[in-house]
Amino acid sequence: MTWDNEFAMSVLPELLQGLVVTVKLTLCGISIALIVGLIAAVLRFQKIPVLAPVLGFYVQFMRGTPLLIQAYVAFFVLPQYGITLSPFVTGVIVIGLNYSAYTAEVYRAGIEGVPTGQWEAVAALGLGARRKWLRIILPQAVRTMVPVLGNYFLQMFKDSAILSAITVVELLAAAMKVGGNSFRYLEPLTLAGLLFMIISFPASLLIRRLERRFATTH
Amino acid sequence: MGAVVEYAPLLLRGLGITLLVTVLSSILVVVVAFVTGLARLSRHWFVHWPATVIVEIFRGTSLVIQIFWFFYALPLFGINLVPLAAAVLTLGLNGGCYAGEIVRGVIKSRPKGQTEVAIALGMGPWLRMRRVLIPQSIPAMLPPFGNVMIDLLKNTSLLSLVTIADLTFRAQWARSKTGETVAIFLTLLVIYFALSWLLGLFTKWLERRFSLSRRSVARPRRLQPVMGGE
C-alpha cells in the first residue's frame, strides 16, 4: 500500500478543521501561559515568605511531570469534584498552566540577566520605580525574553497534539479519526505532520531572525 | 490508596518499561545528537544538507505525530518494528535532533582562538574537533542535555497512547479497573516528579564532575633547562 493522492486530498478539509482547533488551542493556551507566568514570576521576585517557595514548587512540579498526566488529572479528577468543563477548555487550561511554569522562568532569567551595573546605575541616578522598570530594566530584559518565549510558543503549538488524548478534536485527533474510518493512516498522519511543519518551520525562521535582531551587543 | 497497593506490582512493571525506554533512548539521543550536530557543522553541502532536513523535520512536527506515524504509517511501507524498538527509535531521533542543536550551538560558540591555535599546531579538522573543541564543549552542553533527558523521560508517557505498557498505560488500566482516579493519578504524578528530580540531581553531579574548575586544569610541566645554545 502506497501513497494515494486522491484519498489525501479528500481528507484534507477535515484535517484543516483540526488545524484550526490546534491554532485556537495554542493561542488561548499561550495567553494563559504569558499572564499566569508573569504573575508567578513577579510574586516570586517579591520574595514573600510562604508564597515564594510554594510558587517555586509549582514551577518545579509543572516542569517535572508530563503534560499528558496533567491533562489526565484535569480531565478525570476534576469532574469528581463537580467541575465539568469541555475537553477544549480543560485542554487550554492544562497546557496554559503547564507552560506558565516555563514562561515564569523565562521572565525571571530575563530580569536577572540585566547586568548588575544597570541596577546600580538606576540606584545611583535615584530613578523611581516606574522609570526603573519601564525605561531601564524591562526594555533590556524583553530583548532576551522574546526569542525564548517565541520558542515556547512554537513548542506549545506542537505539544497541543498531546491533548488529543483527552478527546480534544485537534489536528492529530482529526487525522486519527479519518484514518480509523478508512483504515488508512499513512496519508492523514503524514499530512498532519506536514501541516505542523508548514506553520512551525517559517515560525522558527522568524524566531531565529528575532534572536539575531535582539542580540545584545555588549 | 487501596488500589495503588493492590496494583503496585503492575505499576512497578510499567515503571520498569518506562525506565528501560528512557535509558535506551537516551543513549540513542547522545549518538544522534553528535552525528547531526557535527554533520550540520560540516563544510560539505552533501553532509550538512541532509542533516539539516532531518533535524528540521523532527523539530518541526509534533512528537506525538511522529510516534503515531512510526506505529501506524511505517508498517505500511513493510517496515515492521517491535513496538519497543519503534518507541526507542522515535524518542531517540526526536530528542537527538533537539540535542544536536545544542551540540552544534555550543561547539560553534567556542572562542575562535581555540580553532586558530589548533590549526597553528598543525592539527587536522578531525583531531581539532576530537581533542580541542568537543572536550571543551562538554561542560557547557551538560545543563541543556539534562533538560533534554528530563523531557525524554516525560515524553515516554506518550507511548501509552500507542499501547506500550509503560507506567502511564498501567496506571490508566488500573484506573479503569478500580475507579480510584485520585489516588492512582497522584501516585503517578509523584513518581514522575521524583524521577525528573533524580535526573536533575544526576545532571548537577555530572556538571560538577566535568566543570572546568581551576583545580582540574593540569599544571604546566616545568621546562627543561636548555643546555648549551644561546
Image (tube, grey):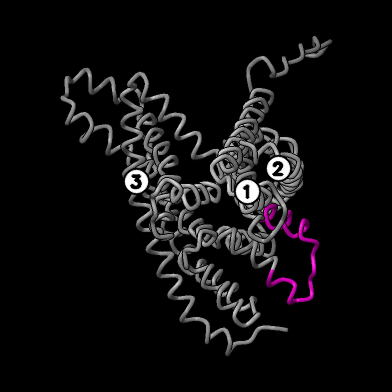
Q: Label 2: which residue?
A: B7
State which chain disc 2 sits on: B
Looking at the rendering, the stretch of residues picked out in magenta corresponds to B72-93
Most foreground residue, A201 or B25: B25
Where residue B83 sits, quadrant-wise, is bottom right
What amino acid type should be assigned to the residue bearing mark 2?
Tyr
Most foreground residue, B160 or B34: B160
Left or right, B98 with respect to A109, comes to: right
Give the class, few, some or many, for how many residues have Cα within 10 Å of label 2's Cα (few <14, many ≥20): some
Disc 3 with disc 2 on a shared chain: no
Asked if residue B220 is positioned above or below residue A128 in the image, the reply reads above
In the rendered image, residue B78 lying in the magenta stretch gets the answer: yes
Q: Are marks 1 and 3 in contact (CB under 8 Å)?
A: no
In the picture, the disc for residue B2 is none
Whole-number angstrom distance, CA of label 1 to CA of label 2: 10 Å
Residue A203: image x %, image y %?
43, 61
Q: Along the polypeptide, which appears first: circle 1 or circle 2?
A: 2
Q: Are marks 3 and 2 in contact (CB under 8 Å)?
A: no
Magenta span main SS: helix
Would you say residue B32 is visible in this rendering? yes
**Quarter occupied by the N terminus of chain A:** bottom right
Whole-number angstrom distance, CA of label 3 to CA of label 2: 39 Å
User: Farthest residue in the right direction?
Assistant: B227
Residue A137: image x %, image y %?
27, 32
Would you say residue B109 is visible in this rendering? no
Left or right, A31 with respect to A97, comes to: left
Looking at the rendered image, the disc whose residue lies closer to the viewer, 1 or 3, is 1
What amino acid type should be assigned to the residue bearing mark 3?
Leu
Looking at the rendered image, the disc whose residue lies closer to the viewer, 3 or 2, is 2
